Image (spheres, helix red, strand yellow):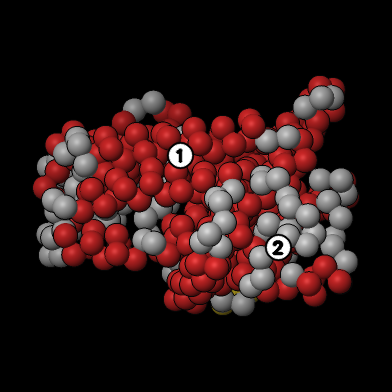
Amino acid sequence: MQLPDLALWRQHWPAALLVAAIPLSLPWEALNALTVLIGAIVGGVLLWRQRRRPLTPAMRDLALISVCLLLPCLLSAFDAVNPKSSWIWVATALRLPLLAVAIILIAQARSATAVLPWAAALPVLPWLLDALVQATFGAGLAGAAEADRLSGIFGSDDLKLGPVMALLAPLLLVPLLRRNLALLVAAIALLVVVLLAGARAGWIGLTVALAALACYRWSRRPKLLLLATGAGALLALTATLAGYQLSERFAERVDRTAAALSGDRDGIDHALAGRLPIFATAVDMSLSHPINGVGVRGFRHAYNAHAGDGDPWVNPVSGTGASHPHYLWLEVSAEQGLIGAIGLLLVHLLLLRRWLRSDSEQRRQALAPAIALLILMFPLNTHPALYSSFWSGLWWWLIGLYLALSERSRGPNEQTSV
């Protein structure tokens, strides 16, 4: 993938800025929320301007995805355990698909689709470099790594560096697929940062990213795929061993993860950072409210009523419990019931159908957000709270990028002004 020339950047700088603003603003949640809101306003204006035009396939898919994800949230709010939290989320949810609308509509020109992947990729680089500086010197832009793992630009009181960098890794790596040396350097840097960040969700996410990229790059050359897999495994093992010897914080995370191999409940719970009670509570909540759940964003408010005796996550003072189930399907089934689970399944099928119906050029353009969405929804991973403002904005941004870049591009003059 060639870096666009300066003329293209000048032509599409508003679109590039809109796409780049989401990853650039991630470390500051208030700024990120404002960025999502601005993107939604842009999407609403562009949608109004094109109200008489027929919907493109990408816009039709977005409409279906929006119904599948947002209608269950609306239905869950009518008898929510905490109506205020649920209705506030529902009332502000329209900004999310409108953000995706903005990305789809600004990417209608072929020349724009050459710029947007780089606009999404370049902001990842400073956060990666800052994390490397913190790993080397003990401090970065957000200060020292005072917690038990690398924290990077997000700071020691917000340990989401590992999952975020793993999720954004495809955006940085895909444009480098044909540049072997740059690809190797970027992959090693990401591997070091995600390993030292200490989040198993990040470890699994980066593994998924690297495996998917290897399969895409060398799927038709099995010998090279085998060689790349072996080299990647060796590199990961070497980095793990080095980190284990050089970092006490990293060694503690590895030891905790290895406790799951003991096979007993206490060892597994220790490896999962004490989350087994959360999973059990989420299952009980889902079974007790099977149709439409306890209400979107209502998990913490319903937690205590469904928690078992001695649950360490119960907070009798605030009357709440764990903030979310740390697993996508449990979060949806607990908060939106069977309706939400069916909607989420349909979203998976819609995204997969779009990939299968795309030609090789469309798949190449949409590869990075496709892999990022795979990481975000990977069923064998712990998951962030996808209905929080931070993660929901990132999720819909990726959906918009995926739909936009997998669309058949129009001619260079058929574009939407921003």
85 to 33, vertically: above or below:
above
Give the camera-side residue of 259 and 131: 131
Is residue 360 rendered to the left or right of residue 31? Answer: right
Q: Characterize the local packing of mark 1: few (<14), some (14-19) or many (20 or more) Cα atoms within 10 angstroms.
A: many
Instruction: Please tell me which residue is depicted at 54% across the width and 38% down the height of the picture.
Output: 351
Q: Position of residue 215 (x, y in %)?
A: 73, 31
Q: Position of residue 98 (x, y in %)?
A: 48, 62
Give the camera-side residue of 190 and 90: 90
The residue that mark 2 highlights is 415
* Quarter of the rendering containing residue 272: top left
Quarter containing the C terminus = bottom right
Residue 280 visible in the displayed image: no
Q: Characterize the local packing of mark 2: few (<14), some (14-19) or many (20 or more) Cα atoms within 10 angstroms.
A: some
**CB atoms of marks 2 and 1 within 8 Å:** no
Q: Amino acid at mark 2?
A: Gln
Of labels 2 and 1, earlier in sequence is: 1
The residue that mark 1 highlights is 347
Q: Position of residue 299 (x, y in %)?
A: 24, 51
Instruction: Please tell me which residue is depicted at 16% across the width and 39% down the height of the picture.
Output: 289
**Which structural element holds mark 2?**
loop
Is residue 119 rendered to the left or right of residue 220? Answer: left
